[in-house]
Amino acid sequence: RKEVEQDPGPFNVPEGATVAFNCTYSNSASQSFFWYRQDCRKEPKLLMSVYSSGNEDGRFTAQLNRASQYISLLIRDSKLSDSATYLCVVNRGNYGQNFVFGPGTRLSVLP
Amino acid sequence: DAMVIQNPRYQVTQFGKPVTLSCSQTLNHNVMYWYQQKSSQAPKLLFHYYDKDFNNEADTPDNFQSRRPNTSFCFLDIRSPGLGDAAMYLCATSSGKNIQYFGAGTRLSVL
């Protein structure tokens, strides 16, 4: 079993749809959590950090459930420009060096 | 302005011919990472430096080496590239447990 797992995808949704991505992690000592997006043939870019209380940034909402070791990302009113691969990233280290990437979920928003 | 700079963006080498990829940062972060990313896969951590301390992942082949002569620069040396080493190589930096900042990557082709 991989340490960080995500919905296999791909997700193909129409513009304006709401889409949710799920991520689970196996290491209960994991300390910080992130969602990155990666466009085709580009580097990953931080979308948002994920906090226990949940956090929102415009159309994006992230949730963390430490008890269930589960992270989610909700995208509302999806845009064509949201098409990308979404990577769940978990930091399991005490000193900040142990970032583990999930396999990613590809999203295509269709006109 | 780019804060993590990778050179070159594209590198073509011959089978078995040593190659060096370069990464520099203006963030003064103490941690620098090298990842390998193959098509449709998540970035895979090869190694990282915490200041001058080198940390190799257990499954990183001996063919891959790294140098960090100072805080700003880090190099990835591939001693004898094979066809299977063709990939995108991503450099990232972080300050402790905080988010990672990625360079644009170097796409390596092996002929």
Image (tube, rainbow, N blue to C red):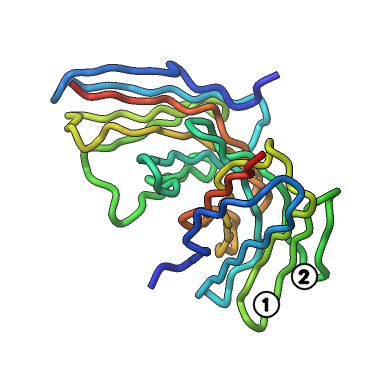
As drawn, is B14 to the left or to the right of A76?
A: left
As drawn, is B47 to the left or to the right of B59?
A: right
Residue on which the image places disc 1: A66
Say if labels 2 and 1 share a chain.
Answer: yes
Q: Circle 2: is it few (<14), some (14-19), or many (20+) Cα within 10 Å?
A: few
Front one among B41 and B45: B41
Q: Quadrant of the N terminus of chain A?
A: bottom left
The amino acid marked with disc number 1 is Arg
* Residue A19 percent location from the top left of the image: 68, 58
Residue B22 versus residue B30 in the image, above or below:
above
Q: Circle 1: is it few (<14), some (14-19), or many (20+) Cα within 10 Å?
A: some
Q: In the picture, residue B95 is in which quadrant?
A: top right
* Residue B68 percent location from the top left of the image: 45, 31
* Residue B109 percent location from the top left of the image: 28, 24
Q: Secondary structure at mark 2?
A: loop
Residue B72 versus residue A33 in the image, above or below:
above
Residue on which the image places disc 2: A52
Q: Residue at x 53, y 49 (%)?
A: A106
| Cα–Cα gap, marks 2 and 1 | 7 Å
The numbered disc on residue B96 is: none
Q: Residue at x 68, y 50 (%)?
A: B98
The amino acid marked with disc number 2 is Ser
Report the chain holding disc 1: A
The reply to whether callout 2 and callout 1 are in contact (CB within 8 Å) is: yes
Q: Residue at x 72, y 45 (%)?
A: A15
